[in-house]
Image (cartoon, rainbow, N blue to C red):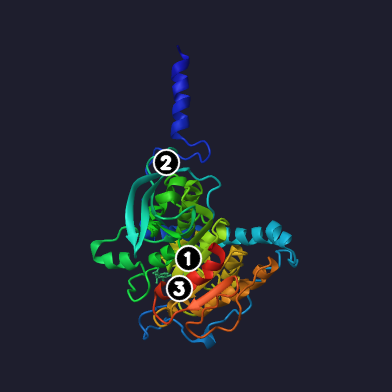
Amino acid sequence: MKLIPYLSIAFLSIILVNPISGQDTTEPPVELTTEEDHQRTMELLGIDSLRRGVNGSNPDAPNYVNYDESKANPYPHLPDPLLTKNREEVTSAKKWWNERRHEIVELFDREIYGRVPGQTPNVNWEITEVTDTTIGNIRAEKKRLVGHVDNSDYPHVTVNIQANLVVPAQAEGPVPVIMQFGFIQLPPFLKRLQESNNEGDDSSPNWHQLVMEKGWGYSIIEPNSIQADNGAGLTKGIIGLTNKGQPRDLDDWGALRAWAWGGSRLLDYFEQDKQVDATRVGITGHSRYGKAAVVAQAYDRRFAIGFISSSGAGGVKLHCRNFGEIVENVAGSNEYHWMAGNYLKYAGPFTWRDIPVDSHELVALCAPRPIFISSGKEGDLWVDPKGMFMAGVHAGPVYELLGKEGLEIDEFPPVETALIEGDIAFRQHSGGHTSGPNWPAFIKFADRYLE
Ligand code: GCU
């Protein structure tokens, strides 16, 4: 039987060399430090050095952050979300959906957040535990969920997405659910934080309780179980798994899109879970997870509503604003992994003016679905509350084209004014870097859509 050795060689080569990428799947992931991968990305772009970011902590530093509004708008002309590449005006919903929206998605894919591969592995959700619990004084059922990502194409990388789902025990049918990018298990010293789940702000109402009182459920998904929050991890996690352990190309996805991808996979699971009404699932997150939440809402049209808390630079803040954190910080080695490699070039040699798209267009990708943009005040200026408000204002024309309403005013409102009458909402609470005090206003806003 001479055929057998040939057959087994052919079989082996199918197993060992992935026919699509041609990469050897027997090699473990490339090991690079964050600094090495950051440098490698600059080399791919042909860049020797980047301009440095601003310093948010030392007022005596020469590169101290700008908090002076009169210097905040060096590039006041934003790209028009309703003008196509060929400079045609978008005056119909049809032209938005068939043409302009695709152009904007392509720009965000290529220049800002990177592309999700055309085919990503299946996720097999396992319910590992079901417990009865009480949230406030409401009886609830809590499920622990693990999403096992199929790694048969590259067994060196394992990804198990950690999540939970809590719904009122008395619910009569499928309930709306608010999904949060956050933490399920915290070290014991952070137990109090877990209980309030308000990023350490104990004076605010517990959002789990507020949601349960509405008869809705909530769900936490852990971004770090999808993709590590650093550059060294880019050859592992879901990005490394789909790249078979190789470092990223310049337009490959960064961690924000990877985290958002994980949220979408959990939403797939909700579509199968009879306790959840998957047409009424909201997405939320704070700070870097606020960035992930707006990316998730923009790219996955199944998310019905978003509560985007203090997302700042790389999130809802306009990239072209000089207030708080700036492009150069996000392009630095601590944060570049959130974005596509191509984003680095806007921190040198190019400038913010060269970025062909801005965050008002990210908000516009969420249209016509409701979005609540929010921040704190003192202690939260780093996220540029006004720059996020402006992104909301300039997304308005797209909402209006689609028969919805943008922000009700275009002047930055006094602190603690809840602008929740339109389909784009905004509120700045008077506290620091936390979502806590904005929850009641968000729930009131969401009530209009989820009830
Ligand atoms: C840093 C970073 C922000 C980020 C924040 C966080 O402050 O500069 O962009 O949002 O960390 O996630 O806590």
For ligand 1, give the image quadrant: bottom left
- Name the amino acid type tagged 2: Asn
Q: Position of residue 434 (x, y in %)?
A: 39, 73
Q: Kindly identify which residue carries mark 1.
A: 291
Q: Kindly identify which residue carries mark 3.
A: 440
Q: Which of the 4 image quadrants contains residue 362?
A: bottom right
Q: Is mark 1 within 8 Å of ligand 1?
A: yes
The answer to whether one can see residue 321 in this image is no
Q: Kindly report which numbered mark, 1 or 3, lies closer to the viewer in this rendering.
A: 3
| C-alpha separation, residue under disc 1 versus residue under disc 2 | 27 Å
The answer to which of marks 1 and 2 sits earlier in the sequence is: 2
The answer to which of marks 1 and 3 sits earlier in the sequence is: 1
Residue at disc 1, secondary structure:
helix
The total of numbered circles placed on residues is: 3
Circle 2 residues within 10 Å: few <14, some 14–19, many ≥20 = some
Q: Position of residue 238 (x, y in %)?
A: 43, 49
Instruction: State the residue lying farthest toward the top.
Output: 1
Q: Nearer the viewer, residue 273 or 65?
A: 273
- Name the amino acid type tagged 1: Lys
Q: Residue at x 55, y 75 (%)?
A: 420
Q: Nearer the viewer, residue 168 or 354?
A: 168
Q: Position of residue 353 (x, y in %)?
A: 59, 73
- Relative placement, left or right, of 86 versus 374 is right
Residue at disc 3, secondary structure:
helix
Q: Kindly identify which residue carries mark 2.
A: 151
Indicate the quadrant containing the N terminus: top left, top right, bottom left or bottom right: top left
Residue at disc 2, secondary structure:
loop
CB atoms of marks 1 and 2 within 8 Å: no
